[in-house]
Image: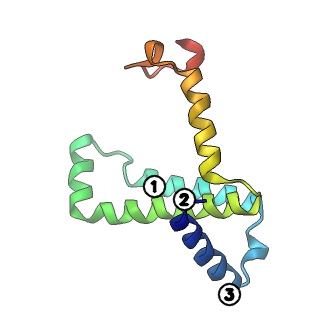
Amino acid sequence: MDKDLKDILGQLLKFRKERDWEQFHRPKELAISIVLEAAELLEEFQWKTDEEIKRHLKEGGLENVKDEVADIAVYILLLSHDLGIDLLDAMKKKLRKNEKKYPVEKAKGSAKKYDKL
């Protein structure tokens, strides 16, 4: 695991332990929390045009977006740790899978799902 990621994980685990929150951080609850935080991230963009989003981000909305992205990342990191998943390794493996599912010559410039290319 990357040193910075390991440091953050250590801080998160200490924070969680000091508050006796391990009891609430079962995999299901962490997965639910990821989705809930992702919904809060979506609220930052909901019903806004591209221009409204640019203005919103410049006028302080970016701080809210950063907070929501961080919340999602925290829960993903905790869930990965608790399930024994090496997050960076899993991401690398997933990228390799996606490279096979979405070869450049078929997928470039297309938003189609792999089975529709």
Distance Cα–Cα, label 1 vs label 3: 28 Å
Q: In which quarter of the image is the N terminus?
A: bottom right
From the top left corner, tell me how far across and down residue 103 is, in percent: 51, 18
Quickly name the residue at label 2: 72
Q: Residue 108 carries which label?
A: none
User: Tag 3 or tag 2, which sits nearer the N-term?
Assistant: 3
Q: Position of residue 110 (x, y in %)?
A: 41, 19
* Horizontal side of residue 79 vs 59, given as left or right: right
For the point 23% across and 50% down, which residue is it? 54
The spot of residue 29 in percent (x, y) is 72, 62
Residue 41 is tagged as: 1
Report the residue at 69% width, 60% height from top: 79
Question: In the image shown, does 71 or 3 lie closer to the viewer?
Answer: 3
Element type where label 2 sits in the image: helix
In the image, residue 109 above or below residue 6? above
Asked if 15 appears above or below 63 in the picture, the reply is below
